[in-house]
Image (cartoon, helix red, strand yellow):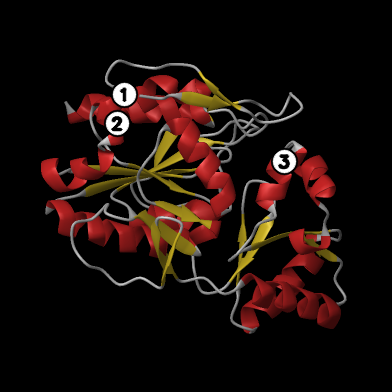
């Protein structure tokens, strides 16, 4: 059951406030045992900005009914986003979410210690998580963007070039949240102050040098050889080992969600802020949800669960 909401960008800050405290709250705390003891057959992977979260306010209030039903049914909700670990942990607390999560366009998957009752490979342990890393170090990405900018002559601006105050102005985030957005480890958001042709010329140069460029809801993203799809596939295999049978759902809104949607059994695309669907996301069996962001998210999830009954 949802316990808290992150206040929207209309205030001076995003504060986590309690909105509901159900009597069975302690059952949610046992989500880790659920995977091992009960077994599961459905997992939902979801993007955040523009999908579960409103594009402008960063609120998930519109998705409450679907979130509550997901928790009632014991369905793992895995956040899979371009946001940083610091940002995701804030939303996990607000959602009372204790499941694994994926950060920075698949740069790493964070699995709470004890979540799976078997051994699996990981790269490091940190703050209560086992971390499966596939992303390149942030310093390498920053250096690559600067070199490509110099070699191409294209005016590109990365998060590393911006102060927290500037990030706040660009994103609509309050300052504290903008600071969390700058705590990057595997992904450099950037934008180009020139024509689309010039932007593509610089991106082509980066691709030639072994990097990936993907379009998100607000920015382009520079990464190593990682994407959301690889991280989703890795976690799906772990869930299969834990329960023996798994069907996966993916929900997104942008080009950088395409690898995730390709990796799941049931891909769902929600409408963007302008009411349109991202035309670069084209895959077989794609479900186009009716509704923008969390409204489409709610509709698609509830309709899916009705079909599951």
Residue 133 appearing in the image: yes
Q: In x, y percent, where is residue 295?
A: 50, 24
Q: Badges 2 and 1: C-beta atoms under 8 Å apart?
A: yes
Asked if 18 appears above or below 224 in the picture, the reply is above
Residue receiving disc 1: 25
Q: Which mark is residue 123?
A: none
Of all residues, the one furthest to the front in this rendering is: 127
Give x and y (percent) for residue 216: 62, 52
Numbered mark located on residue 28 in the image: 2
Q: Residue at x 51, y 65 (%)?
A: 107
Q: CA distance from mark 2 to mark 1?
A: 5 Å
Secondary structure beneath dot 1 equals helix
- Percent across and percent down for residue 10 are 73, 24
SS assignment at label 3: helix
SS class, disc 2 = helix
* Whether residue 99 is situated above or below residue 109 in the rendered picture: above
**How far separated are the C-alphas under marks 2 and 3?**
28 Å
Q: Are marks 2 and 3 in contact (CB under 8 Å)?
A: no
Q: Is residue 247 left or right of residue 98?
A: left
Left or right: where 129 falls relative to 207: left
Q: Residue at x 46, y 39 (%)?
A: 92
Residue 283 visible in this rendered orientation of the protein:
no
Q: Vertical placement of 196 versus 99: above or below?
A: below
Q: Label 2 crowding class (10 Å Cα cut-off): few <14, some 14-19, many 20+?
A: some
Residue drawn at (68%, 74%) of the image: 139
Image quarter of the C terminus: top left
Q: Nearer the viewer, residue 20 or 136?
A: 20
In the drawing, what numbered circle is on residue 176?
3
Label 2 vs 3, first from the N-terminus: 2
Q: Earlier in the sequence, mark 1 or mark 3?
A: 1
């Amino acid at each position: 059951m949802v316990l808290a909401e992150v206040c929207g960008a209309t205030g001076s800050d995003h504060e986590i406030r309690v909105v509901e405290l159900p009597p069975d709250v302690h059952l949610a705390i046992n989500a880790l045992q659920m995977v091992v003891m009960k077994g599961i057959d459905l997992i939902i992977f979801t993007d955040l900005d523009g999908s579960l979260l409103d594009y402008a306010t960063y609120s998930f209030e519109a998705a409450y009914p679907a979130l509550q039903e997901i928790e009632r049914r014991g369905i793992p909700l895995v956040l899979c986003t371009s946001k940083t670990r610091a940002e995701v942990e804030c939303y996990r607390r607000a959602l009372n979410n204790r499941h694994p999560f994926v950060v920075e366009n698949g740069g790493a998957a964070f699995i709470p210690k004890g979540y799976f009752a078997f051994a699996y490979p990981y790269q490091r342990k940190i703050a209560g998580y086992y971390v499966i890393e596939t992303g390149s170090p942030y310093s390498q990405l920053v250096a690559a963007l600067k070199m490509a900018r110099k070699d191409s002559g294209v005016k590109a601006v990365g998060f590393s070039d911006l102060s927290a105050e500037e990030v706040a102005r660009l994103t609509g985030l309050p300052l504290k949240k903008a600071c969390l957005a700058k705590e990057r480890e595997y992904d450099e958001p950037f934008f180009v102050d020139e024509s689309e042709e010039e932007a593509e010329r610089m991106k082509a140069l980066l691709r030639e040098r072994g990097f990936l460029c993907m379009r998100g809801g607000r920015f382009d993203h520079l990464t190593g050889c990682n994407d959301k799809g690889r991280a989703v596939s890795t976690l799906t295999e772990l869930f299969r080992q834990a329960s023996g049978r798994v069907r996966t759902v993916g929900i997104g809104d942008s080009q950088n969600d395409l690898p995730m949607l390709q990796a799941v059994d049931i891909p769902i695309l929600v409408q963007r802020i302008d009411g349109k669907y991202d035309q670069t996301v084209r895959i077989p069996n794609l479900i186009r949800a009716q509704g923008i962001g969390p409204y489409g998210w709610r509709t698609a999830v509830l309709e899916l669960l009705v079909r599951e009954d």
